[in-house]
Image (spheres, rainbow, N blue to C red):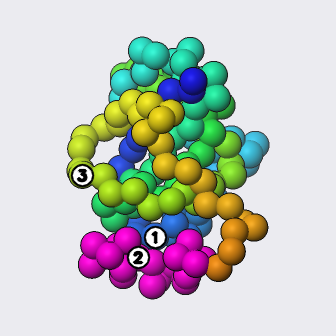
Amino acid sequence: MALHLIKLCVGISQFEELAAWQQHRQSKDGVLQHITRMTPRRGDELLAGGSIYWVIKGHIQARQKLLELRPVTGSDGIAYCALILDAKLVRTQPHPRRPFQGWRYLKAEDAPRDLGKGRARGKNEMPPEMRAELMALGLL
């Protein structure tokens, strides 16, 4: 089973905002990366099909496949880790998550499922604004 990372999406209030921010930050060569201070020790498990799950406004709402863990050195001379991500951002079923610092490991069995495009209309198909408001009220 794959191992995943979970990370808070600070300053982002909805899925579409994260997608736009990432598109803006993507480098000219098409590489999308997220820089973190620490390198995950369980990198081999993460790269065996793992993803990074994004917590937006207290709920896991999106994920991206992890492609590579790349060591980088910042302009301050400090070593960092670049999490190289697939550009495809996938919506997940909203799952509540308390705040935490940095990133955490997430077992495959604890990860929320992806929202499929072919599902029947229901709570997963409602407008994002309505879903966000219902989640804020604790109704989803």
- Visible residue check, residue 69: no
69 w.r.t. 93: above or below: above
Rendered location of residue 73, percent (x, y): 47, 23
**Residue at 69% of width from left, 52% of height from top?**
88
Distance from disc 1 to disc 3, alpha carbons, whole Å, reads 17 Å
**Closer to the camera, 97 or 24?**
97
**Residue at 74% of width from left, 45% of height from top?**
30
* Amino acid type for the residue under numbered disc 1: Gln
Q: Is residue 65 left or right of residue 100?
A: right
Q: Which residues are magenta?
A: 122-140
Mark 2 lies on a secondary structure that is helix
Q: Are marks 2 and 1 in contact (CB under 8 Å)?
A: yes
Within 10 Å of the Cα at label 3, are there few (<14), some (14-19), or many (20+) other Cα atoms? few
* Amino acid type for the residue under numbered disc 3: Arg
Residue annotated with mark 2: 132
- Visible residue check, residue 20: yes
Kindly report the secondary structure that dominates the magenta region of the rendered protein.
helix
Mark 1 lies on a secondary structure that is loop
Looking at the rendered image, the quarter that the C terminus falls into is bottom left
Between circles 2 and 1, the one closer to the viewer is: 2
Residue annotated with mark 1: 14
**Closer to the camera, 110 or 13?**
110
Looking at the rendered image, the quarter that the N terminus falls into is top right
Distance from disc 2 to disc 3, alpha carbons, whole Å, reads 16 Å
* Amino acid type for the residue under numbered disc 2: Ala
**Residue at 42% of width from left, 21% of height from top?**
39
Q: Pick whichever of labels 2 and 1 is earlier in the sequence.
A: 1
Residue annotated with mark 3: 98
Q: Is residue 85 left or right of residue 42?
A: right
